[in-house]
Image (cartoon, grey):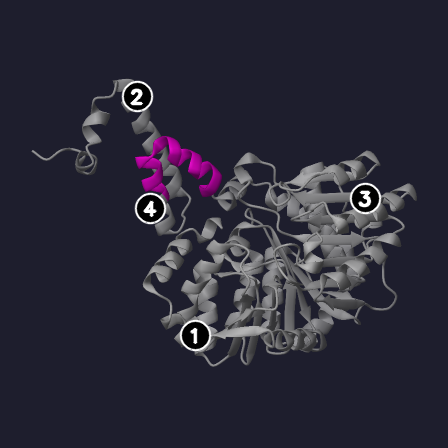
Amino acid sequence: MAHPIPLLAAWHIGPLILDLPWWILAALLAYWAVVVVLLISDNRKPASTLLWLFTLVVLPGLGLVLFLFFGRDWKVITARRHWAEGYMAAVRAKMQPIYDRNAAAEATFEERYDGTFATDVSAAIRRENGSYPLPADSVEIFTEGAQKFARLEQDLAAATSFINMEYFIWEQDELTAKISEILLERMAAGVEVRILYDYIGSISFKKAELKKLEAAGAKVSADVKDIFKLNYRNHRKIAVIDGAIGYTGGMNMGQEYIDGGVRFPTWRDTHLRVTGQAVAELQKLFSLRWFEVAHEDLLQDRFLPVAANGSGAGGVLTQLVAHTIEDPWEAGRRAHMIAISQAEKTLRIQSPYFVPDQGTYDALINASLSGVDLKFMMTGWVDKKLPFWAAQTYYEPLLRAGGRIFQYTGGFFHAKTIAVDSAVCAVGTMNMDIRSLQLHKEVMEWIYDAGITAQLEEIFDHDLEQSREITLADIRAVGRVTGFRNSVARLFSAQI
């Protein structure tokens, strides 16, 4: 007669379980039943469901710990709590006056981009994030930390009302010492200062300067401290000054973003400075995180840009997109996918890492196969070995489809940008890897302007001068051992 649990019998575990006291066996059976029902009810991808079922059933103790830290579907959990819809409706109500007084900007956008992929990108962002196109009085692109931080220091020193800063990493070094002194001076003049940093991203750095700022009156808080959410970090970089000036992009708060630190000869990054009505969206995004962490409402008129003179039809059209692990749409990722899928001529994409999810990867391959001139650039200097190794397993299909891949060798490369058909571009914090595309809190500033897009494309071309192109010959030259190592790294791509 066949054993009633053949798989367990094969592993010699069945008899052990059947010999357990009845109450332990009953508890295990109840646990397995709950696990099966809850996981299947989440409607995850079948492969993910089967993997977690196997882990939780075969390893009840360890599997449960792993699931709590890495496996919970926060999109499903948030939806079941039914609070997000009402919360976002309240946020939209507070932002509506901004959108209303800039309605001419949306009309300009529709007139300029009607019938193009840009309208689809914008519509998706509106539905997913509730964010509308807003005009920026100015948009500046920084490719060097020295330029960006010198400009930021000037803006901080001139602040008269408030300074809100949110960074994934806040170090303690030469740069932060300068920033801290400016903030202390501004607080003495009555300026409000708030600082939000990611708990895990900044955990290895000393906090003496931040504590000094807090003692002087700054409001300082770590973000994402929930023990079960430590795997899902706040990767955003945002600064808002007086509701009039905003920054976002790839640079964290640290000296290495200026000079490369002890590990790299240089640091190549991309960051934005925007002014005008567009700053409202950066303030909104900061406010959402600050409210959750500090329970202080910053979506008030005094924190938002003052009404601009004129109709709001001028300026550079921008639209902010952001996502978190709790969001159902992964809005930043989907905006990229829509733009990539509908590109007709050119795609220029930069990211230090290349470990895409399947949907984004398919979009890139489809674009290349359809004849789009796609060039992707990543770092050639290694800061994290596992994602660098994993990236190499994605090269060959994209190259065979007609895409081109470059590794920047002039220093560590950390820019996160995309330029589409020389018409529209985006700069922000989202890497082309699974963690950024699906797990982290990210932000991208989409810019609907051919002139700014041309600047970004010129920067890309300049970066090519310090880059090495990866070819199919390079792929074929990789040995079997190295190839296997890269494939193993790919298995852990969601956790690196």
Between 402 and 451, the residue placed more toward the observer is: 402
Q: Can you tell which of label 3 and label 4 is closer to the viewer?
A: 3
- Nearest to the observer: residue 146 or residue 329: 146
Q: CA distance from mark 2 to mark 3?
A: 55 Å
Q: Is 408 above or below relative to 248? A: below
Which residue matches tag 2?
Answer: 24
Location of residue 358 by image quarter: bottom left
In the rendering, which numbered label is found on residue 193? 3
Question: Which residue is depicted at the point 62% across and 59% down?
Answer: 264
Q: What x and y, as percent, mark residue 441?
A: 60, 50
Instruction: Residue at 49% x, 55% y: name it.
Output: 385
Q: Earlier in the sequence, mark 2 or mark 3?
A: 2
Q: Who comes first in sequence, dot 4 or dot 1?
A: 4
Local secondary structure at mark 1 = helix
Q: Which residues are magenta?
A: 52-72
Which quadrant of the rendered structure holds the N terminus?
top left
Amino acid marked by disc 2: Ile
- The x, y position of residue 348, in whole percent, is 57, 73
Q: Which residue is mark 1?
A: 399
| Label drawn at residue 50 | 4
Q: Secondary structure at mark 4?
A: helix
Q: Residues within 10 Å of mark 1 (few under 14, many from 20)?
A: some
Residue 31: x %, y % from top left = 35, 29
Q: Is residue 411 above or below residue 75?
A: below
Q: In the rendered image, is residue 90 in sight?
A: no
Label 2 crowd bin: few (<14), some (14–19), many (20+), radius 10 Å: few
Asked whether residue 60 is drawn in magenta, I would say: yes
